[in-house]
Every structure is written in structure tokens, then in C-alpha cells.
Image (cartoon, grey):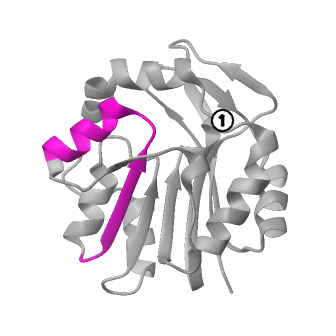
Amino acid sequence: MVDARTIATYDKKAGDYADLVASDQPDTSLADFIALIPAGGTVLDLGCGPGTASAHMRAAGLKPHPMDASPGMIKIAKDTFDLNAKLATFDDIDGTAIYDGIWATFSLLHAPLADLPRYLTMLFDALRPGGLFHIGMKTGTGAKRDGIDRLYTFVTVRELTTLLVTAGFEITHTQEGREAGMAGTIDPFVIMRGKKT
């Protein structure tokens, strides 16, 4: 299920978001992920935004498949990085054993909690054996909109752990922190990596 108001915010602020995440080099989290993917591996960039992460993956020799539900973000990904970015929602995830990695950094937090088990199972199926899944979520409970009208689903670390394990993943990394996003608030988050064994 796509929240139209969230997509409208991303469309309206696509340029601002692109400026916020612009970087010459991948951050530590992305660099660590890239290093764990086989050379030339195929990666689904789920909720790719303006395409920055996919551009870094491509520069490292990987084959990114960027997708996002925001037409504004897709346009920037194509125009700025010449990426073959696909306009799609979480419900469009399909395929079996086609990716060596999935990068879902702070994208699935826009999915309703009730839909997360289904999406995580679909993503597990889409990974090849040994494939790596990276997810970033804001921590907390419930769902609410931020100051710029994006709808968030919050999870506890324990809750996300249970969701990943239930979907079949072996959790290999957990990191917690706090950072400011586009709305300007400093929010707690968790990053996890799970492996398909």
C-alpha cells in the first residue's frame, strides 16, 4: 500500500533530498555492504531515492537495480546518474533467487507494519542463497507523520529482529544510532543486515 501524501512529499522535495544525501564516496554502512557483495553482484536498491547509493554500487563494479515509488526521485536518478531506475512500489517486488544483495536503507519504514512480514518474505525469496539484506528503520512504536507529512512505521530492535528471523534471515549485524533527516529532527534508528543461508 502506497501512502499518496508521503510520495507527494518526496516528489516535491526530491531535489532537496538529493542534496542532503549527495556524496563523493559511500558512507561506512554502504561501503561495508558493498564489500560483502560478490564482485559484479546484482543488488536491488529498494527505495533508491535520487540514486546516490546505486551510483556508488555501480562505481564499485556491482549491478544495481534501483527502484522507487516517487516519480520525482526516479527522474533525478536517471538524469543525474544515468541509472535505469524503475518506478515501482513494495508490492511490485517479485522474482526468486535473482539478487546477491538488497539495500533497503530507510525505505521500508514507509510500509505499514502489517505488510512488513509479507514484504520481507518476498525480499528473502528474491535473494540468492548466501545473499545479503540491509535494512534501516527508525526505532519506536506505532505509526505517525513527520513534520513534512511523510508517514512512518516505527519498530523496536526486538520487533525488527523477530520480523527478519521469521522471514528466514540470519542476522549478521546490528547497529543503533541517532541522526537528523530531511525533516530536521534527530531520530533514533537501527540498521540490520541479514543473510539468506
> Residue 189: x percent and y percent?
63, 42
Q: Residue at x 65, y 29 (%)?
A: 152
**Magenta segment includes 55:** no
**Where 150 sits versus 17, above or below?**
above
Q: Is residue 64 visible?
A: yes
Assign the N terminus to one quadrant of the image. top right
> Residue 108: x percent and y percent?
61, 45
**Where 176 sits versus 192, above or below?**
above
Q: Residue at x 30, y 83 (%)?
A: 40
Q: Residue at x 35, y 56 (%)?
A: 27
> Residue 37: x percent and y percent?
43, 80
Rendered image quadrant of residue 143 = top right
**Where 192 sits versus 3, above or below?**
below
Q: Secondary structure at mark 1?
A: loop
**Magenta segment includes 63:** yes
Q: Which residues are magenta?
A: 61-80
Assign the C terminus to one quadrant of the image. bottom right
Q: Residue at x 42, y 69 (%)?
A: 43
Query: Front-most of 8 and 169?
Result: 8
Relative horizontal placement of residue 87, taking residue 136 as reference (left or right) = left
Relative horizontal placement of residue 33, taking residue 137 as reference (left or right) = left
> Residue 135: x percent and y percent?
59, 56
Amino acid of disc 1: Met
